[in-house]
Image (tube, rainbow, N blue to C red):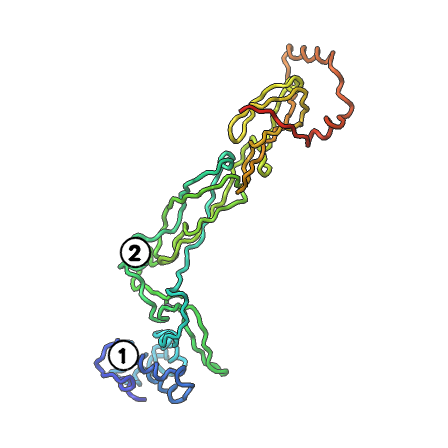
Amino acid sequence: MADYYELLGVSKSVGTDEIKKAYRKLALKYHPDRNQGSKETEDRFKQVTEAYEVLRDPEKRSIYDQYGEQGLNRGAGGASGFGGFDFSDALEVFMRDFGGFGDLFGERQQRGGSRSRPKGEAIKVRVHVSLQEVATGVAKTLKVAILDTCERCSGTGSADGAAPGICATCQGSGEERQAQRTVFGQFISVVPCRTCRGEGRVIEERCPQCHGEGRARSQRPIKVEIPPGVTSENFITLRGEGNVGLRGGPRGEVLVLIEVEEDARFVRDGAHLRYDLPITYSQAVLGDEAEVPTVDGTVRVTIPKGIQSGEVLRLRGHGLPELHGRSKGDQLVRIVVWTPDRLTPEQEEAIRALQEVEDLAPEQLDGDSGRSIWSRVKEAFTQA
Ligand SMILES: [Zn+2]
Ligand SMILES: [Zn+2]
């Protein structure tokens, strides 16, 4: 085989850059994509690539300089040897160092300018809100543990803080074409570049702080506006507030999962709140006024006389707002006539006196005061 230096048309004293330049020029000239599969140029392509592959490597070059091609082929067990360099090896070498063929002729399809960097992973945070806060809506500032830009390298991931260089393997495309020669012909497959893992850029020396990730653990205050009327089924997506991506990639999302705290006093029913108001027999019979807690403060409610246990008073507008709606729910106050199970002698005497004169309960509750009590809702008369 011809002398490697002669093949590349360079002198024995040139540096690696010169060799690379000379090879690139020849490789483009003899590249099979440009020569319609001519056997002659294919062989030339293989030869110049083989020469380049040896001379670009200082170790192989020095063996070649001392012992010639034989020296390379003599490598122990073939592991460090150089025998059997074939055409597909040549294509791989070319693509490893110069990327896809199209790139070099400006034929590569533009993918919207610079390669889009992967954004940071989404994170979930839980926020607890009280029923009062559901009623009014609330702005909260959450301390969220996220991955933030590494301060040492400003997110570049490189030790000197410089922007990562274009990956020499894929020329920044992030893709690698693998040529495979099979009995069916040559196959070219496009895979993510192995050198840069598809990013198109590589770091010379990794930042010692973040090990080249360009990001570090941090606490970040994140403000979230929780609208009135939310439930525990709702969540809020904050775009661009979360983890930064690798090496300066854009921030990902924060999913704020809402957890409405239980309030022992109320049972939520959509926008309505149910509330049980225990009253005494005499209050039920004679009527009274009572203080009732609501999400917007205590209100005084008039208990109409003769109210039945189980009847419901509606406090209009004292419920919760509908999410993104204009209307507000009501608070439904269910009357529960409480029966004492312990009496003082004085109380017992009074009750016995009542028993002497009271009417018997009807055998069956009819119509208005019967079963329908459970669904009957009276408009309550309230004072703020
Ligand atoms: Zn760093
Ligand atoms: Zn690459």
Q: Where's the N terminus, which quadrant?
A: bottom left
For the point 67% across and 11% down, the residue is 350
Foreground residue among 362 and 382: 382
Q: Is residue 352 left or right of residue 5?
A: right
User: What amino acid type is highlighted by mark number 1?
Assistant: Ile
For the point 26% across and 59% down, the residue is 160
Residue matched to label 2: 153
Q: Is residue 140 left or right of residue 168?
A: right
Question: Where ligand 1 lies, by quadrant?
Answer: bottom left
Depicted 229 relative to depicted 169: above or below: above
Percent coordinates x, y for residue 185 in the rendering: 48, 82
Q: CA distance from mark 2 to mark 1?
A: 34 Å
For the point 52% across and 41% down, the residue is 230
Q: Is mark 2 within 8 Å of ligand 1?
A: yes
Q: Residues within 10 Å of mark 1 (few under 14, many from 20)?
A: many
Q: Which badge, 2 or 1, comes first in the chain's sequence? A: 1
User: What amino acid type is highlighted by mark number 2?
Assistant: Cys
For residue 313, which quarter of the picture? top right
Depicted 111 relative to depicted 376: above or below: below
Foreground residue among 169 and 34: 34
Residue matched to label 1: 19
